[in-house]
Image (tube, coloured by chain):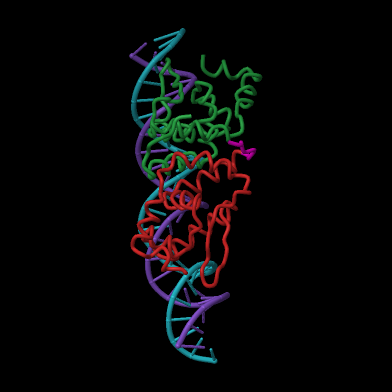
Chain colours: A red, B green, C cyan, D purple
Amino acid sequence: MEKTIMAIEQVAGVLKLFGDKTRLAMISLLAHNECCVCEFVEIFQMSQPAISQHLRKLKDSGLVKERRSGQWMFFSLNKENEAYPLIRSLLPHVPDQKERLEALEAEGLRMSCCD
Amino acid sequence: MEKTIMAIEQVAGVLKLFGDKTRLAMISLLAHNECCVCEFVEIFQMSQPAISQHLRKLKDSGLVKERRSGQWMFFSLNKENEAYPLIRSLLPHVPDQKERLEALEAEGLRMSCCD
DNA sequence: TAATTATATAAGCATATAATTATATGCTCA
DNA sequence: TGAGCATATAATTATATGCTTATATAATTA
């Protein structure tokens, strides 16, 4: 597992970014799945603007990238980012969030809200 | 390197705690040294109350313990804490702070402010 | 082209955070 | 015991954060 060479301010910035349980769960989900805004709205039961604002912070950090597909925006991890190795070190300590995605699928929402 | 079994809220709480560059540098120093308040005041060039307040947050988290020796309070990492493995995963990504301690020693302050 | 859907942005508000200043506590030593 | 030093706490203030509501933008479909 590679090591980062970031200034301490940068490291603190990344930790602050994930010192929020919504964004922490988001990055955990994005580690293994590409997700769209509407899925996050369902999973976290939060308003669409609140979700968009969290995603913007993630995007601004460069750790997450977005891809438009029609009217949907899909988000995924940017493994090229210099803080990615730090994220990799963090993720094993975050409880798996995939059940939340699976719950969506079970409800038939995962592939219905945006496809 | 052991894995933590913390709730996501707890993990986010720890990351928020270290999403501050002063506390992040503190924990990095404490990983290898026992330090007293006056040393931190010198190293970070911050007011004593500001330093005490940061140390209190670290202590409240359980990740740092204190030991009184005369009029001085010495702080060190509490390796028994359940979040310690997370800290261990984080620390390799934090630039080494030991030069700051060495600078103190060079000035003859490390062993003069509290001994 | 108008209505609809998905998402983004802006403004406002309540709460949290980190510093400062002032004061309190606790230990040491004359 | 009282002065002095190290540290802690409290009150205050300035700024940051995260949410809400309202509105804007962009793509889709009728």
- A6 to D17, vertically: above or below: above
Which residue occupies 49% across, 54% down? A33
Q: In the image, residue B16 lies at what x, y percent?
A: 46, 43
Q: Point out the stretch of residues depicted in magenta.
A: A1-7
Which residue occupies 56% across, 57% down? A59
- A21 to A89, vertically: above or below: below
Left or right of B5? Residue A34 is right
Which residue occupies 46% across, 21% down? B74
Q: In the image, residue D10 lies at what x, y percent?
A: 35, 39
Q: Tell me how many marks there are.
A: 0
Residue A86 image-quadrant placement: top right
Q: In the image, residue A102 lies at what x, y percent?
A: 38, 55
Of residues C30 and D5, the one nearer the viewer is D5
Q: In the image, residue A3 lies at what x, y percent?
A: 61, 36
Name the magenta segment's main secondary structure.
Answer: loop
Which residue occupies 48% across, 29% down? B1
Of residues A106 and C16, the one nearer the viewer is A106
- A47 to A2, vertically: above or below: below
Asked if the magenta segment contains residue A23, the reply would be no
Of residues B74 and A32, the one nearer the viewer is A32
Of residues A56 and D30, the one nearer the viewer is D30
